[in-house]
Image (tube, helix red, strand yellow):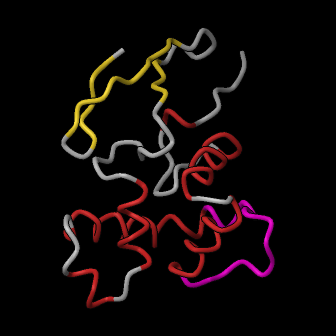
């Protein structure tokens, strides 16, 4: 167990040692993005807002950085063919909406892409990779 700050609040996060790969794995709640201090709902609000509105949102500078990460990461996620909606949107904002809609919510989308593809909504992390068996 360790403590992590999410939106200025301390939260307990469970940790486990993987017997296969010997890595410590943290189990984050679905509303938290790995290595990010802002909630999925805040990220969604920024990503779907119009340009003028985005500037006035709290944490706009941080969320702008997340947006750049999404734009760079979306093609990798799109290559997985997920979600099973055709055609997959090419424009990052439209694809973001498609991901959330197809999963029922962005919280569910985060859980699904980590579980199926070892990807977060914003990037791939070492902790999401499935270890190769020896």
- Examine the structure image and report whether residue 90 is included in the region drawn in magenta: yes
21 or 116: nearer the viewer: 116
The chief SS type of the magenta part is loop
Q: Is residue 82 above or below residue 97?
A: above
**Direction from residue 119 to residue 34 in the image, left or right:** left
Q: Is residue 6 left or right of residue 129?
A: left
Q: Nearer the viewer, residue 76 or 93?
A: 93
Image spot of residue 50 (x, y percent): 36, 88
Q: Which residues are magenta?
A: 77-91
Task: Indicate whether 44 appears above or below 52.
Answer: above
**Residue at 55% over, 68% down:** 74
Whether residue 98 appears in magenta in the rendering, the answer is no
Tell me: 98 left or right of 13.
right
The quadrant the N terminus occupies is top left
The residue located at (33%, 23%) in the rendering is: 12
- Residue at x-position 68% and y-position 58%: 103
Residue 84 higher or lower than 3, as above or below:
below
Q: Position of residue 96 (x, y in %)?
A: 55, 71
């Amino acid at each position: 167990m360790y403590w992590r700050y999410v939106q200025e609040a301390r939260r307990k996060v469970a940790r486990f040692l993987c017997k296969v790969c010997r890595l410590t794995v943290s189990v984050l709640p679905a509303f938290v993005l790995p290595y990010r201090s802002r909630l999925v709902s805040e990220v969604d609000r920024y990503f779907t807002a119009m340009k003028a509105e985005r500037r006035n949102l709290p944490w706009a500078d941080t969320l702008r950085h997340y947006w750049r990460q999404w734009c760079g990461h979306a093609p990798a996620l799109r290559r997985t063919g997920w979600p099973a909606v055709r055609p997959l949107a090419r424009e990052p904002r439209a694809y973001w909406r498609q991901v959330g809609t197809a999963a029922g919510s962005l919280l569910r989308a985060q859980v699904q892409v980590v579980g199926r593809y070892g990807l977060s909504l914003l990037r791939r992390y070492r902790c999401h990779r499935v270890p190769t068996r020896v």
